Amino acid sequence: MMPLSRRHLLRNAAFSGLAGLLPSGAALAAAPARGGRLVVAIDSEPPVLTSAITTAGPAQWISGKVFDGLLRYDNDFNPRPQLAQSWNVSPDGLSITFKLRPGVSWHDGKPFTSADVAFSVLQIWKKYHSRGRSTFANVVSVDTPDALTAVWHLSSPAPYILSALGSPESQILPKHLYDHGDVLTNPRNIAPVGTGPFRFVEWKRGQYIALARNPAYWDKGKPYLDQVILRVLPDGNGAMTALETGEVHLVVNPPWADIARVRKLPGIAVTRSSGFTGALAAFEFNLDKPYFKDARVRQAFAHAIDRDFLVKNVWQGYGEAADSPIPASLSDFHASNLPAYPYDLNKAAQLLDAAGFKRGANGVRFSITHDPLPVGQTYKRSAEAIRASLARIGIRMEIRSQDFAAFVRRIYTARDFDTFQYAASAGPDPAIGTQRFYWSRNFQPGVAFSNGAHYLNPEVDRLLVAAQSESDANKRRALYGRFQQIVQTDLPKIPLVSANPVHLSRGIQAFSVDAYGVMGNFADAFLVTA
Amino acid sequence: MTLHIGNVEKVPAERPFNGFVRPFIRSRRHGYVKFVARRIAQSALLFFLTILLTFALINTAPGDMVDVMAGDSGGADPGYVQLLREKYGLDKPLPVRLYNYVDQLAHLDLGYSFPQSAPVTDLIADRVGPTLLLMVSSLALAVLGALILGTAAAWNVHRLTDGAVSVLALLAYATPVFWIGLMLILVFSVKLSWFPSSGMETLFSGYTGLARIKDIAWHLVLPAITLSLFHLALFTRLLRASLLEVLRQDFVRTARAKGIGEWRVLGVHALSNALLPLVTMIGMQIGASLGGAVVVESVFAWPGLGRLAFEALNARDTNLLVGIVLFSGLVVITVNLVVDLLYGWLDPRIENV
């Protein structure tokens, strides 16, 4: 006689038609189990363990477990309560009132209050967060009528703020530990005290970062895991091996080439984050170079780049061909019926002929250089594919390589380039993720990932500025629709592929449950023993 | 057999280069002190040049720390970039920065690493142990292997053993280290599950004492072998060549003529004299071993200095990189000093004064 386990009962319940009473079939297959140690592979260590003062990827996704944000976002980008229980934007859009969750305490036992919120917005994000400086530029003051109410006053409406209050983007720091001394060298930056589901325990550089369950977490019963260990495995192959041998449970953004092999192994699942953690890869022109002054040349490039081929062969199918700087995943803003540039080498050749760039005696129209973002192999492979296509329409492209620092300096300060390729997050809102690349005011030599093309279109500027402070969602959508039409005609950069993070996992469930994907707080994540 | 042994007892005086003990004690102590003092003075100059060169190299590479940090941030504004440059003193001209650095160093302060948010001394101290452990064990493996293989090859010169050793050495010499590492992982971790694939110890195992030492040794096997293969090849070929050279010399013939057993001739008379070039090479390879460890440390996620240096370089983290170079320099200079002193012990003909 088999002992009746909980799982056994649940399974029988499902077979006997009771499944409808339970939330979903998936929940049945894996009821959350308490306890256990989750080991996650990370390929590089963060500069600090709070994203309140940096937007470096590793910092964002590790500190998201230690800190909660005011809000979180479901998979459809709707804001949901986290440290703020409710929020209310005044009709004129000039103030936002947050009611904070009562009974929340910092990991050192001190209560979390509105003073922490006011301090973080005004003294931290507005000063030290590279994106926060613009996102929260309009916040002029914060009133704290009581410990659980924070009223933000804005100089002009900033609807995108409500998309930027998740933990990875805007972390509330404890005022009592940060209100003295230098923020950037505060010792708490590497030994953080948060309010999130996991407490910081230890950071052994070069080896691991250890987090442990916060027993006093406000969401009773969560988190399920006892420990989260972020193991530093700098080599992608090494991380895959550790997954195979069971030394780690989760690898995020594995080397593309290995996915096909490892996904066949028993017990290993391939999933993708949804929401705004994805990156949009683009091919960008230096518009100061004579070849690229003519929009027809840029359109010819667009016709000569086979984005479906890139998705299939470079991104191994884990991406979508992009047709707009606002990817389809940002469905509130993505416009349809945009100018399309299907892969068509004849069309490309005609456009180049029309622009006056005929083939020379050796069949070459002109030669250019290309600098792919030197992070991983993706952009280099993609550049190689593009080079082959361009060669067929008489454009010779030389691919250069350098390290990250040299790349940033070359493109954004020295401006010593013809074309380059990179990927950047387009979210969480076009005012934050898209505007920076197209707004002429953001042509800022010396500043990484600004308007590197040196694109200037007064109409685009007008649309972007209007959309930035438009409170009416429909009008805002229309403004961004018009914007997409124009920039996809002008093509200062060609959107290539939008891709969300891919995860390879083994024995771990519910680690990516909302719009921040694996950057979320892991409060729902649990281990399943095979 | 017994006859041989009896003869051997009489020959020490015949080991022409080993009658050094008394002269060393009598006349060289003073010389050694002078020698060490001079070497330390030379090293100080070397250190200064090292600082200058490293500082210049990292600062003339395109892009600085702020480019990387702002770039990592995926966007910023000029005010932010300016703020960071001022904060880190990068807005000042290069000579001023160099002066500030040397000044700080004169106060025995290696500075603060902004990209790592920690004092450089702490960062280096964390990595010294693992790096030295890996370096020393891989060099020991290489030397031990070379003694066996090199001797076997020289002994069986132009025979099958010699050929096999030569081919193996050539392969080990020419195969990229990362590939060897990955293959060892594939075979011994993934397929056979004999050794762990990465890391220096089992995390949160709670091991202490002997159990912990055993655990670390277990983790050390694959990375140490990987790192040692290149040097093993180098040392083997060197030892073979120098043994062949020595075996042709008169004193070996004399030893044989006196009826000393072949093993004794080879192991004591020839080998001790063939070791000199090997010792030189080991001294030289210490530096290379520190550098070559970057790849092995990455593949095996070994928490060593090589990886830290690589990160520092990519982040244009001057304080950290110069700190590591200085530390490595200290190790290399110390080891070479020891090697020089060893020469005198191995071969008293070499004058250290």
Image: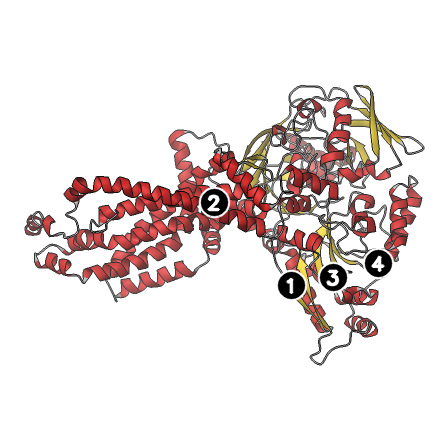
Q: Which residue is mark 3?
A: A308
State left or right for residue B80 relative to residue A269: right
Q: Residue at x 93, y 40 (%)?
A: A472
Dot 4: chain letter: A
Q: State the SS at label 2.
A: helix
3D distance between C-alphas at marks 2 and 4? 50 Å
Label of residue A399 in the image = 1
Labels 2 and 4 in the same subunit: no
Q: Which residue is mark 4?
A: A488
| Residue A520: % across, % down | 70, 37
Around disc 1, counting alpha carbons within 10 Å, would you say few (fewer than 14), some (14 to 19), or many (20 or more)? some
Type of the residue with mark 2:
Val
Type of the residue with mark 3:
Asp
Q: Residue at x 34, y 49 (%)?
A: B283
Q: Which is more N-terminal, label 1 or label 4?
A: 1
Q: State the SS at label 4.
A: helix
| Residue B152: % across, % down | 25, 58
Label of residue B325 in the image = 2
Q: Which is more N-terminal, label 3 or label 1?
A: 3
Q: Which is more N-terminal, label 3 or label 4?
A: 3
Q: Which color scheme is applied?
A: secondary structure
State left or right for residue A278 relative to residue B106: right
State left or right for residue A489 relative to residue B313: right
Q: State the SS at label 3.
A: helix
Around disc 2, counting alpha carbons within 10 Å, would you say few (fewer than 14), some (14 to 19), or many (20 or more)? some
- Name the quarter where the N terminus of chain A is drawn: top right
- Single out the mark in the foreground, 2 or 1: 2
Q: Tell me where residue A469 sits by quadrant.
A: top right
3D distance between C-alphas at marks 4 and 1? 25 Å
